[in-house]
Image (tube, rainbow, N blue to C red):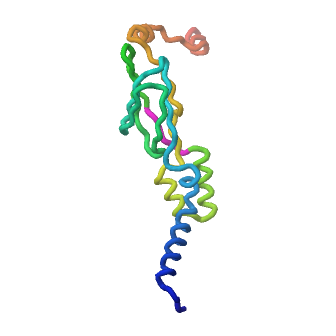
Amino acid sequence: MIFRNPARFGVRALALAGVALSLPACATVTRGSSQQFSVQSTPPGAQVSTSNGFECQATPCTFRMPRKDAFRITVSKDGYVAQTHDITSSVSGAGGTAMAGNILIGGIIGGAIDATSGAMNDLKPNPLIVTLRTPAEEAAAAQAPVATPPAAAAAGGE
């Protein structure tokens, strides 16, 4: 086969290869590799910092976070006890559906792209809702008696 313009063929072939490789990555295309992550607090106006370097000065706030990485988040406000929470990254229903689509279409490459980009995952919990306590409230909660479930109390009384 003789090509009249080999350079033009090379550009077309490269473009076609790029499209072919990106089509199977369904979740990466439809969901993206990051998501909105929100933090709300009572009282509002708390500072937020994450183990992966994100910060906001006052809640409520929203970050654009990578879906693939779990992280730790600290919520603090003057006069209140700071709270630390672990945010997990796990396969979501929509991400699993996109992966199944990749497998059915034969997109092993697309499945690998989705898996490594984190596009199949969601951050949980989202939104993170935190109720901050004063040191006195925290001490009172720590001293409160733990309620015994009725079934356990009945079993122990026999």
Identify the residue at horizontal 48%, vertical 79% (top origin). Answer: 10
Identify the residue at horizontal 49%, vertical 26% (top origin). Answer: 60
Left-right relation of 11 to 79: right
Residue 100 spot, x, y in % from top left: 61, 55
The kind of secondary structure the magenta stretch mainly shows is strand
Left-right relation of 148 to 86: right
Identify the residue at horizontal 49%, vertical 58% (top origin). Answer: 113
Image quarter in which the C terminus is found: top right
Quick one: which residue is furthest to the bottom in this view? 2
| Vertical side of 52 occupied by 147: above or below | above
| Vertical side of 61 occupied by 9: above or below | below
Residue 115 spot, x, y in % from top left: 50, 53
| Vertical side of 25 occupied by 141: above or below | above
Image quarter in which the N terminus is found: bottom right
- Would you say residue 88 sits in the magenta stretch? yes
- Would you say residue 83 sits in the magenta stretch? no
Identify the residue at horizontal 50%, vertical 86% (top origin). Answer: 5
- Give the quadrant of residue 104: bottom right
Of the pair 124 and 2, the residue shown nearer to us: 2
Residue 40 spot, x, y in % from top left: 50, 25
Residue 108 spot, x, y in % from top left: 54, 63
Query: How many callouts does the rendering have?
Result: 0
- Give the extent of the magenta segment: 86-91
Of the pair 158 and 58, the residue shown nearer to us: 58
